[in-house]
Amino acid sequence: MKTNKTDIDIHWGDCDPAVIVFYPNYFKWFDCGTTDLFASVGLDLSTLFAGDDIVGIPILDAGAKFFRPSRFRDTITVESGVEHWGNSSFKIKHTVYNAGKVCAEGHEVRAWVVPAPDRPNGLKAVPVPDEIKARFD
């Protein structure tokens, strides 16, 4: 599995009153990990979505498990990789490290979507092109 690592500095605004990361921020960082993973194989999402072939890669499912807290001024590393390719969807696994130890794990299931020709502003999931999948091998 091709993976990419993204380092993130934790700021005051990322934390709750106990000065530990407020859990929804992990989902924001998972999204950053996905964006950086695609960029690492030459697929800039803003360029990819600018064409007529794909509207986006919306999330169908997401989840996380938390093992250790991260705090203000820590630097965490989000390691992201495509764990599974489906027909029109794929699962990205995220592992978050703090000081070399796993502090959280998460996943996103995303769909490859195009405009739905039969519905104004509608979306339709289609097979992920083989040339896209091949970039992650």
Image (tube, rainbow, N blue to C red):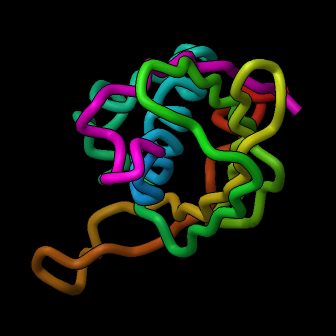
Horizontally, residue 37 falls left or right of residue 131, namely: left
Horizontally, residue 22 falls left or right of residue 83, namely: left
Q: How many marks?
A: 0
User: Within the magenta stretch, is there residue 4?
Assistant: yes
Horizontally, residue 71 falls left or right of residue 89, namely: left
Instruction: Give the residue at x 69% y 58%.
Output: 66
Instruction: Give the residue at x 64% y 23%.
Output: 77
Q: Nearer the viewer, residue 43 or 21?
A: 21
Location of residue 41 (image quadrant): top right
The percent position of residue 53, horizontal first and vertical second, equals: 36, 46
Above or below, comparing residue 7 to residue 93 in the picture: above
The percent position of residue 58, horizontal first and vertical second, equals: 41, 62
Above or below, comparing residue 12 to residue 22 in the picture: above
The percent position of residue 25, horizontal first and vertical second, equals: 40, 49
Residue reaching furthest to the bottom: 118
- Which quadrant holds the N terminus? top right
Instruction: Give the residue at x 76% y 54%.
Output: 67
User: Within the magenta stretch, is there residue 99?
Assistant: no
Residue reaching furthest to the left: 120
Above or below, comparing residue 111 to residue 100 in the picture: below
Q: Which residues are magenta?
A: 1-20
The percent position of residue 83, horizontal first and vertical second, equals: 82, 49
Q: Nearer the viewer, residue 98 or 32?
A: 98
Q: Nearer the viewer, residue 16 or 49?
A: 16
Q: Nearer the viewer, residue 63 or 128?
A: 63
- Which quadrant holds the C terminus? top right
Instruction: Give the residue at x 24% y 37%.
Output: 13
